[in-house]
């Protein structure tokens, strides 16, 4: 495994769970982590898809910070960027995506060679790899399910960031291969009907919905939580 730095600058996801561990927002991510633990009493929830109805709802922020708090809890975690159309995880963690998930799926590199360590103990990253001309074909492939199962053997948790579910079919295909899904919606932005449609698509794909995260909620006066983006 190796970590590769990326010099290209781009707006990064807020890793508040790492940068401000005492904040009320980080505590909300810990609550999400605890709820996942509790939900695993009757079922295994090792492979978790994070998606949203539409772009800019905060799914990548949720996926990254959830992965961090799971690692901080002593778990061995890998965050996978399966948004093969508009990947962002490599920017956030300052990594190259010269080799990543698409490289593994196309059999150019092994899984272990594509995995990156991070400065956060227990947290590993599998970037998207180069953006392919046929992302749907790779997601639908047998290799995708094989990679998920292999990661599941090595890591306590596999957190997978996918494209918005109302945009393309990638998220529902991957969700069908995983233990559960977290649906992220944006308070004040996501229309109720769009959220319901996303839920229906996941249910039709026979995905196990673990819960819904509502972000960018304005806290009430004296209320002990915040919003994030």
Image (cartoon, grey):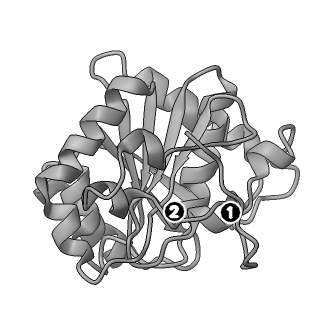
- Residue 1 placed where, x, y %? 55, 39
Viewer-closest of 108 and 179: 108
> Relative to 153, does residue 80 appear above or below in the rendering?
below
Q: Residue at x 74, y 54 (%)?
A: 15
Task: Count up the numbered dots.
Answer: 2
- Circle 1 sits in a helix, a strand or a loop, which is it? helix
Specify few, some or many for label 1: CA neighbours under 10 Å numbering under 14, 14-19, or 20 or more: some
Which labelled disc corresponds to residue 59?
2
Left or right of residue 196, residue 93 in this image: right
Residue 171: % across, % down = 29, 63
Spot occupied by residue 70 in the image (x, y as percentages of width and height): 59, 31
- Viewer-proximal residue among 20 and 24: 20
**Residue 216 visible in rendering:** no
- Which of these two is toward me, 26 or 158? 158
User: Mark 2 packing: few (<14 Cα in 10 Å), some, or many (20+)?
Assistant: many
- Residue 102's tag is none
Residue 69: in sight, yes or no? Answer: yes
Q: Quadrant of residue 71?
A: top right
Q: Earlier in the sequence, mark 1 or mark 2?
A: 2
Point 74% across, 61% down: residue: 14
Can you say whether 214 is above or below 1 in the image?
Answer: below
Distance, label 1 to label 2, CA atoms, is 13 Å
Q: Is residue 52 above or below residue 2?
A: below
| Image-quadrant location for residue 187 | bottom right
The local secondary structure at tag 2 comes to helix
Residue that lies at the very extreme toward the front in this rendered image: 108
Q: Which label was assigned to residue 92?
A: 1
Residue shown at the point (66%, 35%) measured from the top left: 69
Residue 90 point in image, percent of width and height: 60, 63
Q: Residue 199 vs residue 19: left or right?
A: left
Quadrant where the C terminus sits is bottom right
Q: Is residue 195 left or right of residue 147?
A: right
């Amino acid at each position: 495994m190796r970590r590769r730095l990326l010099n290209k600058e781009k707006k990064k996801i807020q890793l508040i769970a790492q940068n401000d561990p005492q904040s009320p927002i980080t505590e909300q991510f810990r609550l999400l982590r605890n709820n996942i633990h509790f939900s695993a009493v009757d079922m295994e929830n090792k492979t978790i898809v994070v998606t949203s109805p539409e772009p800019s709802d905060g799914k990548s922020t949720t996926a990254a910070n959830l992965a961090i708090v799971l690692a901080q809890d002593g778990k061995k975690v890998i965050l996978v960027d399966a948004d093969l159309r508009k990947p962002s995880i490599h920017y956030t963690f300052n990594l190259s995506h010269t080799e990543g998930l698409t490289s593994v799926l196309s059999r150019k590199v092994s899984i272990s060679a594509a995995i990156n360590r991070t400065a956060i103990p227990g947290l590993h990253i599998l970037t998207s790899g180069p953006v392919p001309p046929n992302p749907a074909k790779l997601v639908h492939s047998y290799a995708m399910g094989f990679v998920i199962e292999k990661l599941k053997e090595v890591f306590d948790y596999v957190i997978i960031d996918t494209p918005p579910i109302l945009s393309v079919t990638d998220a529902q295909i991957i969700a069908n291969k995983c233990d559960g899904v977290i649906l992220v919606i944006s308070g004040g932005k996501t229309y109720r009907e769009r959220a319901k449609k996303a839920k229906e698509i996941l249910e039709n794909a026979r995905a196990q919905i673990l819960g819904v995260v509502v972000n960018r909620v304005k806290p009430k006066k004296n209320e002990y939580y915040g919003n994030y983006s």
